Image (spheres, rainbow, N blue to C red):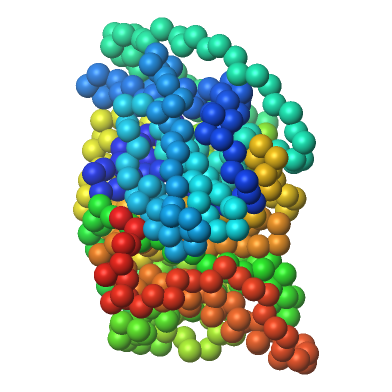
């Protein structure tokens, strides 16, 4: 494993499952369980990691390693369930919350897939889980597409026999770890610039230094900016999961009229959701109050596309929840993101990430676990945007209607928002600690309200009359007290 993947692995804890996931909903009729199993068996040769388990090196002399699971059984990883017919979105969300909230079996290959039947209108769903140490969000989209087709008439190969490689002994693992510890620094050093590029490198470093110097005042400002720390705290074993959605054309319309990028507009809509949440709790204490969100950024190059490891960095964006003006909120977020783009272009982020390869594995393990157990107060949320395909996808001839992303929570950050775009729809999957967010539906409803608020501003800016909004996936209508009495996602 790379140092970053090892960090995700070591972050796994009793109350902090570190898998990413999704819920994809399809038009009916549902395929048989056997058909789904055979489809996945035919695809597994393309993703050998899905037949591998994690082996830790004795005495943690090296980072964990991937080895073939000699007892791999696909029937353990592919599950079959149903909701009471005709199942609605709330029942599916509750089921998905329970499934996604449970830890993977760390002694087996780190993934599961659930076939869900019984949805209204003959629909069915797939709930998928894969550990974060296996793949990041962007690469995960590529890997998940292996079971998807671009045509309903696509043909698939027959499953092939598979023979696992011999499980290495503890001595072999130690020997491999020692070799890796000796060669990795040499490989990193050998990749440094040559003497002939010294002038170009010096100029690049000077430019990077100037750009970073420009960002220091903003970082200092973040240190003294009041954050909604009531959103931080310990994380329990259960999860609430909600979702909402918007039409991609809505975000483009706002971007065109008010400026910025689609991501800026998305973050501004999320800001409205957190503002409504805090206002409902009576915790909107200041116009300067922010919710600081970690926003993962892919640093995967084009030639690294499809590799099965994590290539991510992160920026921290202050969502101005205390600002009552939506146009001002958009401008504030736009300014921050523009500044981060300059800094990310100036800094060799992959090289910074690879510095973790020099950290002793035992210290890495202890450091990650200590950080997760201690919690933190720097950020209050995680927001990640995973771009999906703009063309219809099919599984066994059935068309996917929509999909919702699931992002884990850990380290005192008790809420995450996974954004996934497919065709013309952008969905927001909200994963939150069960006890800390009984009002999670206020957050999902506020995000939808933020989209509509920005649309109204955009149309006023253009001088066009308001038009009926495209129908989006509705947020659950239950109130927080009622939610406690229902069978909520655990």
Tell me residue 244's x, y (percent).
53, 67
Q: Judge by depth and name the residue closer to the eye, 375 or 340.
A: 375
Tell me residue 423's x, y (percent).
71, 57
Point out the image quarter for the C terminus. Answer: bottom left
The residue drawn where x is 35% and y is 37% is 104
Question: Looking at the image, is 170 positioned above or below residue 190?
Answer: above
Tell me residue 180's x, y (percent).
41, 18
The residue drawn where x is 56% and y is 11% is 161
The residue drawn where x is 30% and y is 23% is 56
Q: Judge by depth and name the residue closer to the eye, 420 or 152.
A: 152
Q: How many marks?
A: 0
Tell me residue 425's x, y (percent).
66, 62
Q: Judge by depth and name the residue closer to the eye, 93 or 236.
A: 93
Q: Is residue 85 left or right of residue 153?
A: left
Occupied quadrant, residue 458: bottom right
Extreme residue toward the front, this view: 85
Looking at the image, can residue 389 be seen? yes
The residue drawn where x is 76% and y is 91% is 465
């Amino acid at each position: 494993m790379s140092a970053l993947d090892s960090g995700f692995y070591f972050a796994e804890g009793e109350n902090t499952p570190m898998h990413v996931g999704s819920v994809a909903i399809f038009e009916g009729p549902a395929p048989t369980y056997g058909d789904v199993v055979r489809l996945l068996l035919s695809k597994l040769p393309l993703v050998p990691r899905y037949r591998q388990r994690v082996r830790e090196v004795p005495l943690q002399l090296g980072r964990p390693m991937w080895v073939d699971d000699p007892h791999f059984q696909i029937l353990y990883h592919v599950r079959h369930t149903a909701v009471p017919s005709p199942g609605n979105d709330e029942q599916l969300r509750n089921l998905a919350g329970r499934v996604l909230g449970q830890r993977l079996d760390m002694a087996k290959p780190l993934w599961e897939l659930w076939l869900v039947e019984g949805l209204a209108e003959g629909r069915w769903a797939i709930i998928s889980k894969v550990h974060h140490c296996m793949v990041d969000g962007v690469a995960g989209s590529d890997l998940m597409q292996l079971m998807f087709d671009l045509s309903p008439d696509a043909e698939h190969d027959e499953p092939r026999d598979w023979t696992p490689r011999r499980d290495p002994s503890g001595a072999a693992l130690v020997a491999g770890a020692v070799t890796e510890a000796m060669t990795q620094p040499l490989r990193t050093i050998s990749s440094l610039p040559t003497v002939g590029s010294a002038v170009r490198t010096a100029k690049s470093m000077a430019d990077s230094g100037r750009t970073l110097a420009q960002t220091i005042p903003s970082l200092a400002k973040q240190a003294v900016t009041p954050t909604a720390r009531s959103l931080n705290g310990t994380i329990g074993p259960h999860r609430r999961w909600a979702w909402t959605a918007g039409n991609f054309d809505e975000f483009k319309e706002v971007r065109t009229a008010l400026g910025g990028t689609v991501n800026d507009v998305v973050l501004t809509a999320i800001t409205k959701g957190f503002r409504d949440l805090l206002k409902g709790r009576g915790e909107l204490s200041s116009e300067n109050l922010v919710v600081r969100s970690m926003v993962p950024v892919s640093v995967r190059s084009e030639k690294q596309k499809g590799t099965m490891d994590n290539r991510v960095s992160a920026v921290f964006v202050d969502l101005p929840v205390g600002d009552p003006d939506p146009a001002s909120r958009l401008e504030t977020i736009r300014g921050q993101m523009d500044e981060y783009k300059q800094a990310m272009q100036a800094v060799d982020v992959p090289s910074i990430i690879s510095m973790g390869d020099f950290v002793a594995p035992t210290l890495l393990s202890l450091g990650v676990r200590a950080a997760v157990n201690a919690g933190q107060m720097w950020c209050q949320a995680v927001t990640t945007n995973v771009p999906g395909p703009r063309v219809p996808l099919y599984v066994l001839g059935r068309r996917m209607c929509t999909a919702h992303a699931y992002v884990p929570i850990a380290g005192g950050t008790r809420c995450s928002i996974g954004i996934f775009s497919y065709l013309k729809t952008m969905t927001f999957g909200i994963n939150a600690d069960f006890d800390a967010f009984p009002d999670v539906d206020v957050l999902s409803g506020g995000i939808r309200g933020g989209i509509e608020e920005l649309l109204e501003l955009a149309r006023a800016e253009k001088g066009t009359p308001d038009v009926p909004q495209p129908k989006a996936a509705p947020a659950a209508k239950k109130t927080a007290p009622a939610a406690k009495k229902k069978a909520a996602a655990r």
